[in-house]
Image: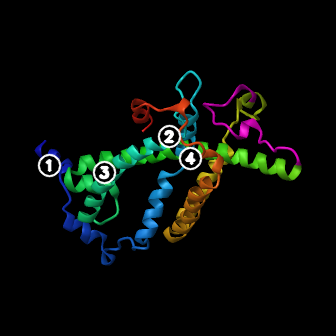
Amino acid sequence: MAAIKQQILRRKPAARLLAEAGPHAGGLKRALRAFDLTLLGIGAIVGAGIFLTVGTAAAGEGAVRPGAGPAIVLSFLLTGVACGLSALCYAEMAAMIPVAGSAYTYAYATLGEIVGWIIGWDLLIEYAAGNVAVAISWSGYFQELVADVADLLLGRPLRFPPWLTHGWRHAPPEALATAPRLAGLPVVVDLPAAAIVLVITWILIVGVKTSARFNLWLVVTKLIGPTLLRRHRDPFLRRSQLVSGRRILGVA
């Protein structure tokens, strides 16, 4: 029993982590600069979740909650402070243990093998669930884009069949009714969501430099695009939409 306890609680020293991550030990090659890492962070933060959540928080959801209006940026300021403190913690750990692995490596080195194992699986579940939500959200944007472009070029919007734009759990009745059947069961799949996951996976397999360049263009688009839409910035704070401190904290 003591041997098992010692094994699951054993820690890997930072010196050993650094030695195993060195180029002579077959470690990963450093290919990203500080600028690339910064853009990767921005790309991970500014995404579909922000665009969707900000829309409902600013405009409101009927009787569920009132809208905060453009003053929602005050919530972002408070959130930015909290994220900054978290970033400082990660920066300190990364400076002490400058190897790949993120929270898994930090936990393994400081809290033990069992804690690192748990956090490693937590990260896998977190990324899997997060990727599903982002892919579904991206699918909605893509469908709207295709419809708008088709309306502009062809004079009528182009819509995907309902059974190709919904998952099994959230498929509406019309999707289940029109879907092809396999062994008596309706076949429904969110095709754009599945396609974007495969495309991003392929880009990651090609190489980290290609991924960083692709992320650069995405970040530039996401940062510059909204600033061109002036009508969403005026007025900033209307008297009829004054936001209480409690509401700002709730959105943050």
CA–CA distance in space, label 3 to label 1: 34 Å
Distance CA(mark 3)–CA(mark 4): 24 Å
* Nearest to N terminus: mark 3 or mark 2: 2
* The C terminus sits in image quarter: top left
Q: Nearer the viewer, mark 3 or mark 2?
A: 2
The tag earlier along the polypeptide, 4 or 1, is 1
Residue matched to label 2:
71
In the rendered image, which residue does mark 1 sit on? 6
Residue at 62% in and 31% down: 170
Residue 178 shown left or right of residue 4 in the figure: right
Helix, strand or loop at label 4? It is helix
Marks 3 and 1 close (CB-CB < 8 Å): no
Query: Which quadrant: the N terminus?
Result: top left
User: Which of the two discs, 3 and 4, labels the residue nearer the N terminus?
Assistant: 4
The residue that mark 4 highlights is 48
The amino acid sitting under disc 1 is: Gln
Rendered image quadrant of residue 218: bottom right
Residue 170 located within the stretch drawn in magenta: yes
Task: Give the structural element (helix, strand or loop) at label 1.
Answer: helix
State which region is magenta: 155-174
Give the residue at x 69% y 36%. Answer: 188
Q: Secondary structure at mark 3?
A: helix
Mark 3 sits on what residue?
Answer: 85
Say whether marks 3 and 4 touch (CB < 8 Å): no
3D distance between C-alphas at marks 2 and 1: 53 Å
In the image: residue 249, left or right of residue 3: right
